Image (cartoon, coloured by chain):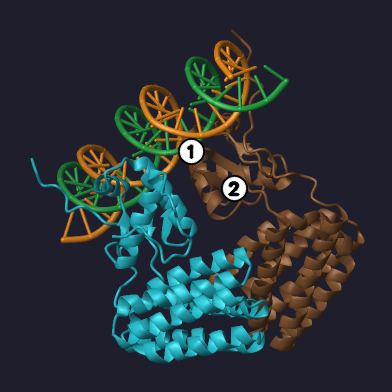
Chain colours: A brown, B cyan, C orange, D green
Amino acid sequence: MLANQGSTAKIVRPTTLRESVLERILELIIIGSLKPGQHLVENELADNLGVSRQPVREALQLLSGEGWVDLRPGHGAYVHSPTVEEADQLLAVRTLLETESARLAARNPDKTDISDLRDICNRGLAACVADDVDAAVAANSELHTAVVNMSDNRVLADLTSQVARRVRWYHTPVARHRGRASWEEHAALIDAIETGDEDVAADIMRRHTEHTRQSYLESRAANPVEEPPAPIRRRRPRAVSG
Amino acid sequence: MLANQGSTAKIVRPTTLRESVLERILELIIIGSLKPGQHLVENELADNLGVSRQPVREALQLLSGEGWVDLRPGHGAYVHSPTVEEADQLLAVRTLLETESARLAARNPDKTDISDLRDICNRGLAACVADDVDAAVAANSELHTAVVNMSDNRVLADLTSQVARRVRWYHTPVARHRGRASWEEHAALIDAIETGDEDVAADIMRRHTEHTRQSYLESRAANPVEEPPAPIRRRRPRAVSG
DNA sequence: GGAATGTATGCTGTAGGCAGTCGACGACAA
DNA sequence: TTGTCGTCGACTGCCTACAGCATACATTCC
């Protein structure tokens, strides 16, 4: 039922059904309603979302392209189940991309953009102090996005946002418990961008993201993988009806 | 011809129709049968490929995810028409990714892999001397792929191969006319990887790819954009039949 | 003659349906 | 009890059909 959006992220023009279906499935994955390794049965999704299988299939194709689901020919779509190694690799790539973004941002600093950065930073710090985790997380991604956009490299920005979204999915719970220090690093980063010192900016961003990576690994080491790769096939308990 | 990729990700079994359709459309784009900005009418593609619209649609979804086509809701798919800026940005990202790959490859050099690299390098140089452009280009991408795979970072490798494929589409014609020097750089790169000097390896790769970028820009400056953004809508000349 | 509106046409977006295929369960034999 | 084979169910992959829409052309009015 309800083909309406939950107004998740501002979807300016959910022109097509597959777009909104994609957003909704993605949200279900991110919030954990659809668990890693879970088999996504097209009919179930279609019924739940109140559409036919077609837009669901197309949304799954798109999601597979971004690495959110795995398509196994003849078997269907499964929520991607990231291994620790893969998460680490993704975090490394994230570091690489964002470091370069920071460098490019510092290369041509723009006053208006800097001002925006400071606003976001202040907002984030305030949210952090107020223990408003959601707002802090939102401000965090907002700030990183803003920096990436300052790089004036759209290809880089697109790639980074894709990677960052998955990174956030993997380690969101970790992000909170180092909030305070994180925002100090952000402030230093903005200073470096403003003064145009690209090496410093890059270095700060590198250490900043590396720090995140470290805490991810540590948290992983603390509570080892709780979920086995999940059984290949989900099976209805078999309708015993005659 | 040849559904084989640049051996990027060996697609062992194009089990499903949409996979083979994807490969065929992609090839048509790369070889230029489908020109940038061209409207890809689903029915035409389906008829030409001897399938129904369904697998064509799904292939187009996947292609849009990799940036080969643009989907405009309500209008359909159009072959992506890269601007000079975007190509330059993509080349910059390529440089970034491959430089990191080279660094990681040098960090844990493997004798077998090194041996493979040398083989490919020799093959490429021979092809270059023999003026066998196709073989040289193939060896080139093969070598870069091998280096990337040595990075032991699958996420990075996948991302790089995607970017590299598009880069090759943009500047293939340019690649040839600096073939000789290119292979000397390759040889130096392999040496650096073998000795494990990651800074040197990274530096060589960076300059190597930057060089490519420069020649791209120069060739672009030489013959300025010949293709206007292409008309939005392709219209059949209207069947005048009665 | 120019502009606005009506009409025709092709395309996309979506729905529904059928066949092929894969996995699982149960029966039979050793 | 254990291993192997046959049957069944379910899901995917693909095809066909219909509705909505955007564009271009023709007509009419000012």
Q: Report the side of A122 relative to D23 (left or right).
A: right
Front residue of B99/A133: it is: B99
* Pick the front one: B143 or A60: B143
Q: Residue furthest top?
A: A242
Residue A62 to residue A91: above or below = above
Is residue A10 toward the left or the right of residue B117 in the image? Answer: right
Q: Give percent across and percent down for residue B239.
A: 14, 47
Q: Report whether residue B36 is seen.
A: no
Vertical order, A136 against A60 (above or below): below
Q: Are marks 1 and 2 on the same chain?
A: yes
Residue A223 percent coordinates (x, y): 86, 52
How far is disc 1 from disc 2 in space, using C-alphas? 15 Å
Residue behind mark 1: A74
- For residue B118, the mark is none
Q: Count the marks.
A: 2
Q: Residue at x 74, y 77 (%)?
A: A206
Q: What residue did someone put label 2 on?
A: A69
